[in-house]
Image: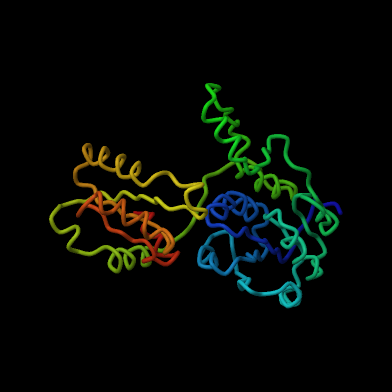
Amino acid sequence: MPTSGLNPARILVRGVNWLGDAVMTTPALLRLREHFPQSHITMLSAEKLGDLWKKHPAIDGTLIVARDESLWPLGRRIRKEKFDLALVFPNSPRSALEPWLAGIPIRIGYARGWRGWLLTQALPARPEHIPMRKRTTAEIRRLLRSDTSPITPPPSAHQVYDYLALVAALGASSQVIAPRLHVTDEELAQAGKEIIPAASVSEIHRPLFFGLNPGAEYGPAKRWPAENFSAVARRVAREFPEVIWLVFGGKADAKACARVAGQLGNRAINLAGATSLRQLMCLLKL
């Protein structure tokens, strides 16, 4: 189905399910808003990321997918919203099934696996796209022993360009812009009062807040050693002695965060499991 000259009144964006990936979709969302300034854009979001889209300038509303919500009830719920177009960011079969079940007439996403027939426009992978795969233990050991320099991907291989290419299929600009989240001044002030103890800043006039996030969703496979975070923090503190470290993480990162914070003494505030998503966004803005 041709997509040039479209003027959809209601657009559904099927969002990705991981926080870092979601941030990388924001340049594409901003370009989508730029191209369709009058359209109502709704984000279909995993429950854990719903707060990310509050007050975002590219989003008019949010539909939340509950963690245990099955396809058929979700499809009926989406159908009631009468969307004209669906843009599918994730590559999973389910993410293409959802707008298909909802009967959205135009459905755009990448043709990954068998799901292409669920889309009215299934885009091939970009030439610069580098497929990810899990290496075997033997491969990793062989690479560690090798003297060969690792292959450095070109900047155009970055995932942010995959999302921009999807909105470009609708006529939007594919020129990269910085990722953007949004919090209000009121939220920023409130988060600072609630999360950062006054005692931690009273001894110095103008503290610098630096952040560390030593955790990772899949544990050691994607985690830099806690000792390395601590070593870098101590080195930075020699240049910026007034720094206060905010150690970020979820509940599952408590052990790693405690190790890092413990090695930094009274110049660290351990926030593992202590912040909401909106509070995390505010503190990062500091």
Residue drawn at point x = 82 percent, y = 54 percent: 114
**Residue 234 % position (x, y):** 25, 41
User: What residue occupies the far left of the structure in this picture?
Assistant: 203
Q: Quadrant of residue 191?
A: bottom left
Residue drawn at point x = 71 percent, y = 66 percent: 10
Q: Relative to residue 224, is residue 234 drawn left or right?
A: left
Q: Quadrant of residue 165?
A: top right
**Residue 122 % position (x, y):** 80, 50
Query: Where the N terminus falls, by quadrant?
Result: bottom right
Q: How many numbered discs?
A: 0
- In this rendered view, identify the residue nearer to me: 4 or 122: 122
Q: Is residue 228 above or below residue 217?
A: above
**Residue 49 % position (x, y):** 54, 64
User: What residue occupies the far front of the structure in this picture?
Assistant: 138
Q: Relative to residue 274, is residue 132 drawn left or right?
A: right
- In this rendered view, identify the residue nearer to me: 263 or 17: 263
- In this rendered view, identify the residue nearer to me: 203 or 43: 203
Q: Is residue 12 above or below residue 171?
A: below
**Residue 152 % position (x, y):** 57, 29
Residue drawn at point x = 32 percent, y = 68 percent: 190
Query: Where the C terminus falls, by quadrant?
Result: bottom left
Residue drawn at point x = 77 percent, y = 64 percent: 97
Q: How is the image coloured?
A: rainbow
Q: Relative to residue 171, is residue 51 drawn left or right?
A: left
